Image (cartoon, rainbow, N blue to C red):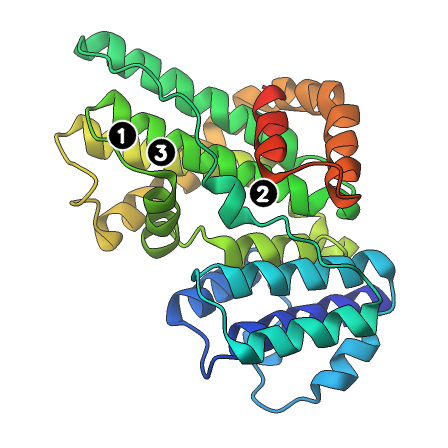
Amino acid sequence: MAEQSQALAGLRVMVAVARADGRIAEEEKRQITDALAELAPDLSPDEVFAERFDLDEEIAKIIEPDVQRATYRAALVLSMADGESHAEESKLLAKLREAFDIHDDGHSVVEVLEHKEPLAPVEKDEQKRESESKREVLGTAIMAGALGANPLPIVSFFTEVGVFYLQGRLVRNLAWYYGHEVSMKEVGAMMATTFGLGVARVMVVQLVKFVPVWGSVVGGAAAFTTTFALGEAVRRHFAAGGDFASLTRKEARRAYEEIKKGAAKEEYEAAKDEIAKKALEKRSEIEALARDARDGKLKDEEVANRIKGLE
């Protein structure tokens, strides 16, 4: 299957860039492995993380312009995720630009996540705080589901960035509801280390969407349940008196997985008609956003504002 061959090559290129500074970070490897297990179960991680493959041959396999752009963006974002620039990463990115004949695409998940906006109001009344925070979790999950339901691979980078941005903002707002102030950068790091929802996963999702057999399972349901489980796990932790620092990986991940398999699926069944309706209503706006961002007409702050404006 040509699409699968190109997507696999893109994943290998992405891993090569992540590994360019000497080794791939364990957290990045875990995110990629977890995402593959969920989204492309018939693909062995060993095929992606193979130590020996000819990078030039893998690059040459990627012939569709949209897959080329997706591969380059995935490589670019992973190279920027740790906030450091490495010479070998820069060389690989230059090789990709030359091979694919594309201009540098500077839009990154990291920069969009750092976009600042007003925080949710602190709520002192416990009963009101619980109802409002639950409403925010559900509302954000529905919007994430609408973004994730867009079937076009060419806009998946921006829809997945949008889902990740909404998830980060949700966690930040929930923290503020319960009296804990954290930055979006801190939230992004926590989402990656605690829940495995980092930029590596975002990049895997956009490449997987090019393969019909794999991409069919990446949609509104996955975006909704992931967002709902994340928000509800964090909300329950804060409601029980916990703070941001005590949100440990083992306990939080257990709660996240339980909610994702249980309550999140139930909520999705109840909300799927609303998600489908919102996805249809917002489709033209989402695709216009993707086109404008792809063509370099929007700065990162404008991307974030347009995502926020979709709600």
Tell me the residue at 50%/66% (across/down). 33
What residue is disc 1 on? Answer: 175
Tell me the residue at 80%/43% (across/down). 295
Label 3: how many Cα within 10 Å (few below 14, some 14–19, many 20+):
many
CA distance for labels 3 and 2: 15 Å
Q: In the drawing, what numbered circle is on residue 161?
A: 2
Disc 3, SS:
helix
**Three-letter amino acid code at the position of disc 2:** Val
Is residue 48 shown left or right of residue 229?
right
Tell me the residue at 63%/26% (across/down). 306
Q: Position of residue 219 (x, y in %)?
A: 65, 40
CB-based contact (under 8 Å), mark 3 and mark 1: yes
What residue is disc 3 on? Answer: 171
Q: Position of residue 83 (x, y in %)?
A: 44, 60
**Which is nearer the eye, 39 or 146?**
146
CB-based contact (under 8 Å), mark 1 and mark 2: no
Quadrant of the rendering where the C terminus is positioned: top right
The answer to whether any part of residue 225 appears in the image is: no
Label 2: how many Cα within 10 Å (few below 14, some 14–19, many 20+):
many
**Three-letter amino acid code at the position of disc 1:** Ala
